[in-house]
């Protein structure tokens, strides 16, 4: 794999370098537009899945080798998940670690419970696990997506991050409303989705049942400070997420069960 090693630094001095990935695939419009915007300020490399990996969550490919295809000098496609892409990049493909990993721009929301299933969020989470700051960026309503506006808003978040230091183990989940219209950035908590008709059962031509996991979102739950509420107000939602999933406020209670 040594022939795939990518130097970030050429003849010119580069102040900031960003690794871009996603779960919509290497040819998705969101990552293309984001890259164009990022390259107007900094330098980037794209390492993204060969094909769509939506809802891949934080899966790593362990039961087969991963193939890496070079598209150009700074664009690599991996036949794996977003987490695969980030791990390969930070632990093998890149000669120098980037200043930031940005996952997105995803075509579709990653709000509330979505963060558990999202490949987009997993890309930022894997970077954080490996010691590089990460953010996930998504459009909340893909049918009215303006990726140029989304990329511009993403740059503002990135610029802010370069002025501050994320706490250890923390990354940002950013969701952009369909039409920002000069709204504001809100720091939010996660809400909860309520689904209906989650499992769709059908019968194939041979009379055997099969199932689709999908369903429709009927409503959301949460207070006025949650991510869903911010999006409904037309504001950008920025949710700090922590890799430590320990329910610390329940440690003593559960310990008492086994004392």
Image (spheres, rainbow, N blue to C red):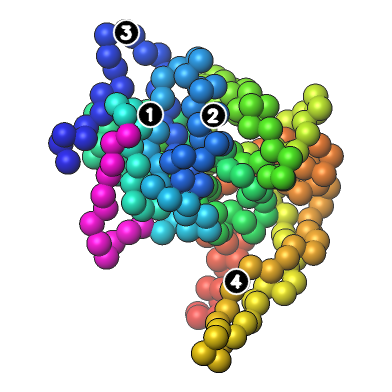
Of residue 24 and residue 99, the one placed in the foreground of this image is 24
Query: Does residue 257 appear left or right of residue 77 in this picture?
Result: right
- Residue at label 1? 45
Instruction: Report helix, strand or loop for mark 1.
Output: strand
- Marks 4 and 3, the one that precedes in the sequence: 3
Q: CA distance from mark 3 to mark 2?
A: 22 Å
Decide: few, some or many residues near mark 1? Use Cα within 10 Å; few <14, some 14-19, many ≥20.
many
In the rendered view of the protein, which quadrant contains the N terminus?
A: top left
> Distance between the Cα atoms at labels 4 and 3?
49 Å
For label 2, the residue is 34
Query: Which residue is under mark 4?
Result: 213
Pointer 3: what residue?
A: 12
Q: Is residue 66 located in the magenta-colored stretch of the structure?
A: yes
Q: In front: 165, or 229? A: 229
Residue 246 in the image: x percent, y percent? 52, 60
Which residue is at a point 40% across and 33% down the rendered structure image? 46
Which quadrant holds residue 137? Answer: top right
Q: Please indicate, yes or no, whether residue 99 appears anywhere in the rendered image.
A: no
Sort mark 3 into few (<14), some (14-19) or many (20+) by Cα contacts within 10 Å.
few
Task: State the separation of the CA atoms marked 4 and 1.
Answer: 34 Å
Residues rendered magenta in the picture: 60-71
Picture residue at 68% right of the left edge, 27% below the top: 149
The residue at the far top in this view is 12
The mark that comes first in sequence, 4 or 2, is: 2
For the residue pair 169 and 206, the one nearer the viewer reads as: 206
**Looking at this view, is 183 or 129 the one in front?**
183
Residue appearing at x 26%, y 24% in the figure? 7
Q: Position of residue 189 (x, y in %)?
A: 70, 47
């Amino acid at each position: 794999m040594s022939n795939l090693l990518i130097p970030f630094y050429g003849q010119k001095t580069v102040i900031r370098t960003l690794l871009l990935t996603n779960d919509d695939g290497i040819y998705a419009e969101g990552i293309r537009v984001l890259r164009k915007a990022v390259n107007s300020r900094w330098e980037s490399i794209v390492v993204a899945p060969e094909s769509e990996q939506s809802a891949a969550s934080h899966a790593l490919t362990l039961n087969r080798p991963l193939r890496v295809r070079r598209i150009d000098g700074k664009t690599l496609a991996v036949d794996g998940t977003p987490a695969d892409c980030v791990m390969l990049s930070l632990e093998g493909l890149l000669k120098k670690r980037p200043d930031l990993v940005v996952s997105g721009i995803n075509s579709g929301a990653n709000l509330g419970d979505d963060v558990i299933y999202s490949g987009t969020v997993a890309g930022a989470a894997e970077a954080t696990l490996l010691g590089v700051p990460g953010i996930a960026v998504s459009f909340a309503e893909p049918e009215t997506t303006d990726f140029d506006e989304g990329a511009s808003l993403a740059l503002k978040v990135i610029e802010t991050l370069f002025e501050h230091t994320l706490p250890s183990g923390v990354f940002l989940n950013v969701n952009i409303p369909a039409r920002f219209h000069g709204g504001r950035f809100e720091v939010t908590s996660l809400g909860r989705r309520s689904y209906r008709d989650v499992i769709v059962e059908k019968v194939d031509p041979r009379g055997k049942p099969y199932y689709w996991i999908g369903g429709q979102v009927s409503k959301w739950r949460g207070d006025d400070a949650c991510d869903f509420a911010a999006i409904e107000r037309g504001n950008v939602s920025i949710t700090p997420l922590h890799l430590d999933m320990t329910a610390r406020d329940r440690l003593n209670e559960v310990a008492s069960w086994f004392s």
